[in-house]
Image (cartoon, rainbow, N blue to C red):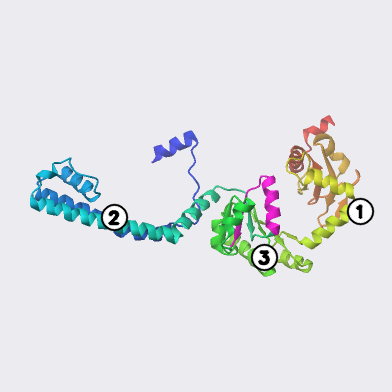
């Protein structure tokens, strides 16, 4: 066993991840009806083998061979059946009839199990669960509706993996229609659904139900799942809210971000009316997956060398090719388009815009405690 593990490590073989729920018990229950036909076939083989050994004096191997092609009625001639004794011929006829009856019974069991469709459903779901178990840093999208269709389009465009959970029976047809690569038919707030969606390896969860009760139940269930399964990093939970008044309520219950379609639509229309050029810029760059630009908030820890430095002294534009377009203070107050003399305070957030490579480099600079070497050449 140790040798196999060493060989796997040398060749960098990784065992396929196993889902938390494998449906093995359900699959075994569907296969139970096949037990009786299999037992009857084995009894038939044993009965025929003993009979031919006693009646015709065959060796064990010849008796097994004779029994096998007799009960399957594939033909005669290999062992000189024409020389059988009358008792042997009568035994052979009885064995053929019995074997034929067993196979007809087995065929009936197979047809009955297949017609019910449950075995096929379990096998398809089991295959899906093993595929989902390979996912990491994915999002779990709860409930199928118009919002889900649009959200999943954007996730696919940005190559972000996701699993859709919905209790409706036609979710498979909907998944094919709207190109959901991974889906589960279940009530999203149940622990079983979260285990099937491989939530333990997920980055976050999005609940898009039109009912605030469903969204509340999901938020509570996800936070409880974190505690019970000792998840080291909290999930990023996004919730939809039909009513603007429900936004604060959902945030207090544990949602990190709450999106109100009506409020979001109003904001977008206002931006388009007041500053159409800015909206065009967002559409052209920040909302696309292949854009050269990105925008992100970067947290400034207490130990950062930037603390109490003027923004122009950081020279982020020169050494990282990014621009700071906003600073969110510790108290949550936003300073838009800060000037070069603005001080960088501890535990604030820098809203930077630039290339993905530049933003990543900026994150590394902000974390440093000592002034970076790159400043010597500015």
| Among numbered discs 1 and 3, the one appearing first in the sequence | 3
Q: Residue 99: horizontal and vertical position, in percent?
A: 23, 54
Q: What element carries label 1?
A: helix
Asked whether the viewer can see residue 53, the reply is yes
Which residue is painted at 16% across and 43% down in the image? 62
Image quarter (top left, top right, bottom left or bottom right) of the C terminus: top right
Q: Say if the magenta span includes residue 156.
A: yes
- Whether tag 2 and tag 1 are in contact, CB under 8 A, the answer is no
Which residue is painted at 61% across and 56% down in the image? 174
Residue 32 lies, with reference to residue 62, above or below; the image says below
Q: Residue 61: horizontal and vertical position, in percent?
A: 17, 43
**Which residue carries the number 3 mark?**
215
Q: Residue 122: horizontal and vertical position, in percent?
A: 47, 57
Q: Is label 1 or label 3 in front?
A: 1
**Magenta segment boundaries in residue numbering:** 146-166
Q: Is residue 206 left or right of residue 9?
A: right
Q: In this view, does 80 lie to the left or right of 267?
A: left
Q: Is mark 3 on a helix, strand or loop?
A: helix
Which residue is painted at 78% across and 36% down in the image? 372
**Which residue carries the number 2 mark?**
103
Q: Is label 3 or label 2 in front?
A: 2
Q: Residue 314: horizontal and vertical position, in percent?
A: 84, 40
Q: What element carries label 2?
A: helix
């Amino acid at each position: 066993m140790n040798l196999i593990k060493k060989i796997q490590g040398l060749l960098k073989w990784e065992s396929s991840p196993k889902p938390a729920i494998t449906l093995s018990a359900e699959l075994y229950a569907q296969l139970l009806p096949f037990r009786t036909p299999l037992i009857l076939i084995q009894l038939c083989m044993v009965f025929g083998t003993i009979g031919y050994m006693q009646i015709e004096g065959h060796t064990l191997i010849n008796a097994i061979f004779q029994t096998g092609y007799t009960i399957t009625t594939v033909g005669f001639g290999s062992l000189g059946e024409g020389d059988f004794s009358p008792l042997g011929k009568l035994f052979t006829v009885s064995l053929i009839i019995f074997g034929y009856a067993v196979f007809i019974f087995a065929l009936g069991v197979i047809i009955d199990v297949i017609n019910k469709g449950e075995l096929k459903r379990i096998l398809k779901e089991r295959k899906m669960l093993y595929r989902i178990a390979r996912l990491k840093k994915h999002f779990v999208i709860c409930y199928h509706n118009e919002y889900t269709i649009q959200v999943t389009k954007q996730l696919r465009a940005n190559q972000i993996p996701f699993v859709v959970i919905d209790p409706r029976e036609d979710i498979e047809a909907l998944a094919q229609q709207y190109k959901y690569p991974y889906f589960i038919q279940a009530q999203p707030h149940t622990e079983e659904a979260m285990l099937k969606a491989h939530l333990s390896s997920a980055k976050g969860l999005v609940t898009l139900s039109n009912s605030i009760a469903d969204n509340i139940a999901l938020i509570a269930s996800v936070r409880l799942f974190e505690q019970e399964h000792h998840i080291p990093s909290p999930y990023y939970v996004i919730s939809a809210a039909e009513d603007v008044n429900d936004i604060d309520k959902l945030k207090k219950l544990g949602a990190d971000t709450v999106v109100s379609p009506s409020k979001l639509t109003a904001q977008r229309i206002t931006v388009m009316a007041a500053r159409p050029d800015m909206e065009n810029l967002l559409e052209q760059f920040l909302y696309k997956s292949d854009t050269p630009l990105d925008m992100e908030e970067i947290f400034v820890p207490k130990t950062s060398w930037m603390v109490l430095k003027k923004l122009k002294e950081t020279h982020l534009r020169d050494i990282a090719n990014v621009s700071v377009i906003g600073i969110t203070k510790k108290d949550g107050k936003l300073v838009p388009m800060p000037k070069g003399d603005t001080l960088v305070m501890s535990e604030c957030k820098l809203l930077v815009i630039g290339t993905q490579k530049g933003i990543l480099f900026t994150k590394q600079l902000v974390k440093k405690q000592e002034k970076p070497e790159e400043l010597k050449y500015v």
